[in-house]
Image (tube, rainbow, N blue to C red):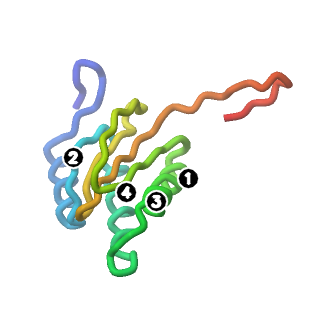
Amino acid sequence: METLQGLKTRSPAEEVKLAAAAISLNVRLRSSDMPIDIQEHAMRCARSFVDSAPKRRPNLTHLARSLKKEFDSEYGPAWHCVVGTSFGSFVTHSPGGFLYFSVDSLSVLLFKTEVQLVMEPDGEKRL
């Protein structure tokens, strides 16, 4: 399905699949602008990390770092991740690169920004 702006909308079947994945992982989706398969990947990674933490008390910095590194390696740079129990945010993200969800009592904000090459004076490229 397409909207007026050319952005894809989800079919009812896709919505049901995503809801089923969230329920099975005990995750609450709050807001997203991301393809369903990538959302599921994020939810599964976060759930796995939380479940593997000692006494189910994960290190929030490690969780954020793990999600960021996973997404940088899987979907390219530059992903950012914030994990906590109470935070505010206002971010600019690349189209299709935003997800906000909860795992147990933790909130997870995962988003992608655009990376532009910068030319050094000697002509070398760097990120």
**Type of residue at label 3?**
Thr
Say if 105 sits above or below 101 in the image: below
Circle 3 Cα neighbour tier, 10 Å, few/some/many (<14 / 14–19 / ≥20): few
Q: Residue furthest right?
A: 122
Label 3 or label 1, whichever comes before in sequence order: 3
Can you give x and y, in whole percent of width and height, for residue 59 in the image? Answer: 42, 67
**Type of residue at label 1?**
Ser
**Type of residue at label 4?**
His
Residue 25 sits in quarter: bottom left
Tag 2 residue:
30
Circle 2 Cα neighbour tier, 10 Å, few/some/many (<14 / 14–19 / ≥20): few
The C terminus lies in which quarter of the figure?
top right
Picture disc at residue 61: 3
Q: Residue furthest top?
A: 4
Tell me, yes or no, whether the two marked residues, 4 and 1, touch with CB atoms within 8 Å.
no
In space, the residues marked 3 and 1 are separated at their CA atoms by: 18 Å
Picture disc at residue 41: 4
Say if 94 sits above or below 40 in the image: above
